[in-house]
Image (spheres, rainbow, N blue to C red):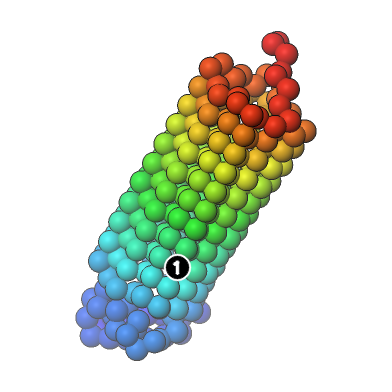
Amino acid sequence: MTQIKNKEGTELFSHKGDWRETLEAAAEEGVDLTKAVLDGVDLSGANLENLNLRQASLRGANLRGSNLEHTNLAGANLHEAQLRGSNLEHTDLREVVLAGCNLEGCNLEGARLVGANLVGINAQGSNLERVDLARANLDGANLEGCNLEDARMSEANLTRVNLRRSNLEGVDLDGANLARADLRSANLEKADLRDSRLEGANLRDANLERAQLDRANLTNACFDGANLERASFAAATLTGASFHGANLERVKGFIMPEPE
């Protein structure tokens, strides 16, 4: 008999079977598992669609290949959990702790991650289309080759993030911190980067056609070989930024910085 208890030690659900079978039974029966303690459990391949795991503790849990579509994980702690190849489409992950997690190859389309702790995650090659990452902390995260089309990342901390070759078309990065971010060969067409911080960021060979960079801090950023056609730089700080070989056709509000 597998028993699921909450943080106060109160039993929430019990079932004859292993952890995966027990959680799947709870999902089928619509059991409320708010604040459940599931640290280190093996839930690989489990179908947990629509399950309420709000504020649950899943530290170090194995959720590889699991289905968490529409699951409520708001405020949950998944520190160093394994989620490789999982389906998190439209999952509620607001204020969740995912620091150090492996999210490689996951589907997070439409997921809500407002204010989430994603420090140091590996989400290489994942689908994050239309994801809401407003005010999330992604310091040092690996998002190389991800699809972030139309994602909301306003005021997010993306310091030192790896976004090489990622698709960020139409992304909202208004007020985001991208200091020292790696955006080489990324697609930022029509991206909103107004009031963002890009100090020391590497945008070599990136596509920023029609991107909005008004009032952005671009100190020491590298735009060498980038496509900046019809981009807007009104009131942007360009001290020390480089534009060698960049396409500056029809750029708005751009004044080439003086060489240092």
Q: Quadrant of the C terminus?
A: top right
Please, what is the three-letter code of the amino acid marked with disc 1? His
In percent of width and height, residue 57 lies at 45, 68
Q: Residue at (50%, 34%) from the top-left corner?
A: 207
The answer to whether residue 105 is above or below residue 187 is below
Q: Nearer the viewer, residue 4 or 212?
A: 212
The answer to whether residue 194 is above or below residue 21 is above
Is residue 126 toward the left or the right of residue 257 in the image?
Answer: left
Q: Quadrant of the N terminus?
A: bottom left
Q: Which residue is mark 1?
A: 90
Is residue 114 toward the left or the right of residue 67 in the image?
Answer: right
The answer to whether residue 117 is above or below residue 88 is above
Q: Residues within 10 Å of mark 1 (few under 14, many from 20)?
A: many
In percent of width and height, residue 231 lies at 63, 35
Residue found at the far front of this picture: 250
- Asked if one can make out residue 192 in the rendered structure from this viewpoint, the answer is yes
